[in-house]
Amino acid sequence: MDAETISFYPRPPEQLRDRFARQLTYLRISVTDRCNMRCDYCRPAPDAYRAESHAQILRYEEIERIVRVAAGLGVTKLRLTGGEPLVRRDLPRLVEQLANIPGITDLSMTTNATLLEKYAHDLAVAGLQRINISIDSLNPLRFRKLTGGELAPVLAGIQAAKAAGLSPIKLNTVLMRGINDDEVADLIDFASDSGATIRFIELMPMKQGMDWQQHYIAIDDILKRDDLLQRVELSPMPTGNSAARYLPLKSGRGKVGVIMPMSERFCEGCNRLRLTADGGLRACLPADHQLNLRDLIRDGGSDEAIRATFLRAAMLKPEIGLYEFDTEREKRSMIHIGG
Ligand code: SAM
């Protein structure tokens, strides 16, 4: 075989490794920092929050270009998030662009599902494979108080996701003591009846001024409760790189996920990078280091320069991500970074 023949074979992707030998294969992309809900634990106070102007937000072509470079570095898995991804106009177009990038094998989205009934079919046709839906309560009044939104469209969105063939459907609930921790059993039953997997997430202190101490509840405390023990086997299933641990349901109808960013960090197996809506590349949710891909691209930066930025971001990934309050925290709430 001569050199020319060899060059026809695709080059195996280079690997994006950090200083701790973790291979980074998963990019979470925030497509907007705007949201149609007002969840208190996620959004800063109005005077501390200003959505970026449209000009500051990455265009779809810019996101696509960044992902092509990332795929060349071995990124295979993408998740679209926000803000609320479905408030961004024409999202199925971006999904289609990303689904067609060689090397991308897993394309999913995290959404509050309020607009999903309208878009589920188009998203699935465009190439979205699976979906995570945030739902913190099944009580319409409580839901409205927590989010400023309505529960009914979210329930319709879950049904639409199912009808569109998005699979699996995961439901994410942030557990808050005294707010929704009395709904654990109902949420498990609801998910199981809907053919979805519920995942309970520990509340993270992402925002200055939130009453985190009062509302934080460790998953371990929930796992001791009778209503949970009646439903769940306490023998974790194998998880791979997932942030969640899964416990089988005693009914045999699925499983329950628990995500414990506070009580049991999952940094060891972390394979993630994040792209903020305005083009910041971050290697760790709570760590502050962020590299600016938007300015690099708009200043005429080459693909090689984008690639070098990914390699640099990987080097900045800390071994462990620490969540702590500090005076700067307000700038980094979930809605800005992308959940
Ligand atoms: N708008 C979409 C949604 O609601 O799913 C996507 C973005 S949202 C920031 C992604 C996830 O982050 C949601 O499930 C939300 O509950 C979670 N989240 C936001 N702030 C959080 C916090 N302080 N602690 C734990 N989870 C949080």
Image (cartoon, helix red, strand yellow):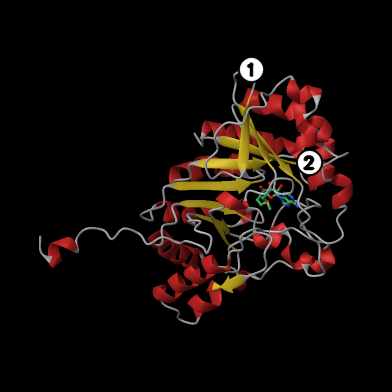
**Is mark 1 in CB contact (under 8 Å) with mark 2?**
no
Asked whether 217 or 277 is in front, the reply is: 217
**Which residue is identified by label 2?**
218
Residue 294's label in the rendered image is none
Q: Position of residue 199 (x, y in %)?
A: 66, 37
Q: Position of residue 11 (x, y in %)?
A: 28, 61
Q: Position of residue 263 (x, y in %)?
A: 74, 46
The image quarter in which residue 208 lies: bottom right
**Which residue is identified by label 1?**
251
Q: Position of residue 114 (x, y in %)?
A: 67, 44
Mark found first going from the N terminus, 1 or 2:
2
Figure check: 10 above or below 216: below
Figure check: 332 above or below 55: above
Q: Residue furthest front?
A: 20
Under mark 2, the amino acid is Ala
- Any part of residue 176 in sight: yes
Residue drawn at 71 percent across, 59 percent down: 322
Figure check: 88 above or below 313: above
Q: Residues within 10 Å of mark 2 (few under 14, many from 20)?
A: many
Q: Residue furthest left?
A: 1
- Any part of residue 49 in sight: no
